[in-house]
Image (cartoon, grey):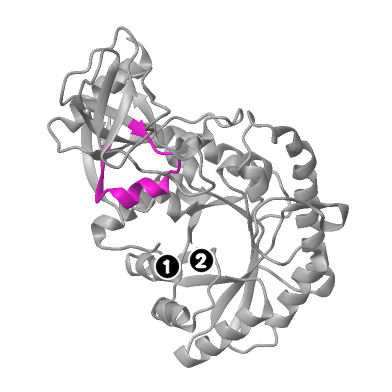
Amino acid sequence: MRVRARRYEQYRQAIGNARLPAALVDLEAVDHNLAALLSPVRASGKTLRVASKSLRSVELLRYVLRQGGATVRGVMAYSPAEARFLAEQGFDDILVAYPTAQPSDVALVAPALRDGARVSLVVDNLELVRIADAAAEAAGVRVPLVVDVDLSYRAAGGRVHLGVRRSPLHTPLDVADLAQRIGDFRHVELLGLLAYEAHIAAIDDRGPLAPLKNITRPAAASLRRAIADELARRGIAIRLFNGGGTGSLAFSSGDDALTEVTAGSGILDSHLFDGYRDLHLEPAACFALQVTRRPAPGFVTCQGGGFVASGSAGMDRLPIPYLPEGLRLTRLEGAGEVQTPLVVPAGIELALGAPVFFRHAKAGELAEHFASYALVRGDRVESVAPTYRGMGQCFG
């Protein structure tokens, strides 16, 4: 039996008569993906920080940290509220990777800091440092800060920009100046740097921008090295220099300027990573919808399914049918909130009530639609892991 046909039968047996829609995570695929992601990290002597927004499940986070052993260290969170929640669950090394200008956010993480957890916040300008310092004084804590660097590729005096719009810090002097100024404040301290090459990690090997990687990779590595050298020249010590993402993990693992790299989506292998030649991953997360109509020969319609991913709107943000193999969305309706029609190839018969398994475009966002994941190994459910939503949490 072909691999995907066998997997369909395994998943179908695992979910049994569960109410649909339902979501599952294949632990055998997770183990495979972790091994693939950790291989270059271990070879480089670095550690991997897990991006929580790609999992959004405490049990899954714990599983990844256990399986990764000493190579997996720390969590990258996406909001102070989430960091507080994770600290309450026992996580003690949390980097909040997106800045905040609300003093109340420092108050949220203050109890974790008092209890000995390391919860660090990113900053990219002096105003954010001042806000954090004043809030830390009011809360009676000392907050570790990480300076966020923009690695977007720039040319022609800035007229050419390839990358996301993140930090305003683009040069070694800009970064070092801010890092140095942090030392002027009493209630914050410099922990390190975050320099994520989003413009490299987000470009697959099939698109028209793929050839630009040959230019942007050396430029990003050169900038990170120049930043590290400028800090060393000024005698500014850092304990952490973070970079990388699933789409650029091998590249960043080989960057000597970095002390650690981050990955998350590759653990579950959402379908936006299907176009990366160097990523040998297996789909590990999917959701099941029931077939409720057969509107015409060669078509079935599933109930629900409009779980559209964030980002620039396009067909690539829609979930895609995964199992049985060969199904495809119709271009007119796509994936809908109340129904998702599918084109069915010859040779596949789907009864009313049969499950169809879909893959989301982005790994973590699937968790916003389900209270739990069935953790599957082979054809059985090993356990049920609540998502953040299932634990009554929402950090959007």
Residue 352 lies in quadrant: top left
Q: Horizontal and vertical percent for residue 139?
A: 45, 89
Tag 1 secondary structure: helix
Residue at mark 1: 83
Q: Horizontal and vertical percent for residue 389?
A: 28, 57
Q: Nearer the viewer, residue 76 or 239?
A: 76
The magenta stretch is 358-375
Q: Residue at x 84, y 70 (%)?
A: 233
Q: Horizontal and vertical percent for residue 303?
A: 23, 35
Q: Is residue 35 above or below residue 222?
A: above
In the rendered structure, which amino acid carries the disc numbered 1? Ala
The image's mark for residue 174 is none
Image quarter where the C terminus lies is bottom left
Residue 306 lies in quadrant: top left
Q: Residue at x 48, y 53 (%)?
A: 51
Tag 2 secondary structure: strand
Residue 56 lies in magenta, yes or no? no
Residue 330 lies in quadrant: top left
Left or right of 375 in this view: 283: right
Dot 1: few (<14), some (14–19), or many (≥20) neighbours within 10 Å?
A: many
In the displayed orientation, state which residue is furthest to the left.
17
Residue at mark 2: 96
Q: Earlier in the sequence, mark 2 or mark 1?
A: 1
Is residue 359 visible to us here?
yes
Marks 2 & 1, CB-CB < 8 Å contact: yes
Q: Nearer the viewer, residue 192 or 308?
A: 308
In the displayed orientation, state which residue is furthest to the right.
156
Q: Residue at x 51, y 66 (%)?
A: 96
Left or right of 233 in this view: 63: left
Residue 365 lies in magenta, yes or no? yes
